[in-house]
Amino acid sequence: MAENLVQKVLHSPGVILLTLNDPGTRNAMSEEMAQQFAAIARALRTDHSVRAIVLTGSGGAFSGGGHLDMLFEKMKLPAEKNREIMESFYDSFLSIRAIGVPVIAAINGHAIGAGLCLALGCDVRVASSSAKLGLNFVHLGLHPGMGATYFLPRLVGYSRAAELLFTGAILSAEDALRLGVVSYVTSPEDVLSKATEIATQIAQAGPHVMRQLKETLLQTEYSTLPESLAREAQCQALNYASDEFLEGITAAREKRKPNFQSS
């Protein structure tokens, strides 16, 4: 198995930087990369010193999507085997959503196909002004995968998502911002610093509350209003008895910044 297809470093206190690291293929997503990504995600899930994650790509791309060699190999396999493999492949990369902390995608270059799906699975997206973004599955004669049909309609609405998926259109960063696919567009040299700025702000908040909130937001994708209200009340009830809330409310009364400790 190729090594270091995904790199993990401590970027700043509480903030982890994950980098898709196969620049020779524009960080194409292979089964080997999927396994490494999933292993890192599993380890991060139990590391409570982590408060936010920045996800980016090495070189000039975020990710060009599925590795072409991997896709060609699928032609040799029966449909049922491919279904099993693809579900596992999706789960490996989308395990980023189950770590339990906010994830900021620093889209430093092109994010195409499954590469854009991975970015859409993050909580916030910052894109380079030179990046191109698109879900071009249909141009490969391939149904969209890895959550494309789930994430995109929730961000831009059904009609716009249908148009983008049906045409496989490639968007400029500015068009992606206008449609709500990304939250910020910066100069290429500022993408990582902007994403890190957001992650650092998150890392200064209460770590237990942030993990609660991440879980709540994932649940509200399919919750009713009464269910959301019940979840909010349950979480606040737990917070009121916590040291984290005591520090937060004390800091507010003393007109200072709170100092939340990892737990």
Image (cartoon, rainbow, N blue to C red):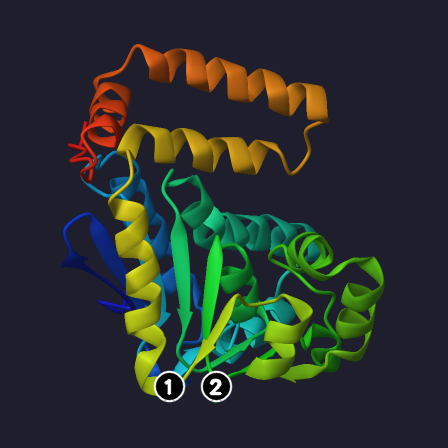
Disc 1 packing (10 Å; few <14; some 14–19; many ≥20): some
Judging depth in this view, the residue of 153 and 258 nearest the camera is: 258
**For residue 131, which numbered disc appears in the image?**
none
Q: Residue at x 58, y 55 (%)?
A: 86
**For residue 129, which numbered disc appears in the image?**
2
> Which part of the image, by quadrant, shows the C terminus?
top left
Q: Residue at x 43, y 62 (%)?
A: 31
Q: Residue at x 58, y 76 (%)?
A: 72
Whether residue 217 sits left or right of residue 168 in the image: it is left
* Occupied quadrant, residue 161: bottom right
> Which part of the image, by quadrant, shows the N terminus?
bottom left
Image location (x, y in percent) of residue 242: 27, 15
* Occupied quadrant, residue 191: bottom left
Q: Amino acid at mark 1?
A: Pro
Image location (x, y in percent) of residue 175: 65, 80
Judging depth in this view, the residue of 149 and 144 nearest the camera is: 149
Q: Give the secondary structure at mark 1.
A: helix
Where is mark 1, residue-wise? 188
Residue 130 visible in the shown view = yes
Image location (x, y in percent) of residue 63: 45, 75
Disc 2 packing (10 Å; few <14; some 14–19; many ≥20): many
Does 126 appear above or below 24?
above
User: So how many labels did they put on this image?
Assistant: 2
Whether residue 75 sits left or right of residue 126 in the image: it is right
Residue 36 visible in the shown view = no
Q: Give the secondary structure at mark 2.
A: loop
The earlier-in-sequence mark between 2 and 1 is 2
Whether residue 256 sits left or right of residue 103 in the image: it is left
Tell me, yes or no, whether the two marked residues, 2 and 1, touch with CB atoms within 8 Å.
Answer: yes
Image location (x, y in percent) of residue 99: 37, 41
Q: Amino acid at mark 2?
A: Ser
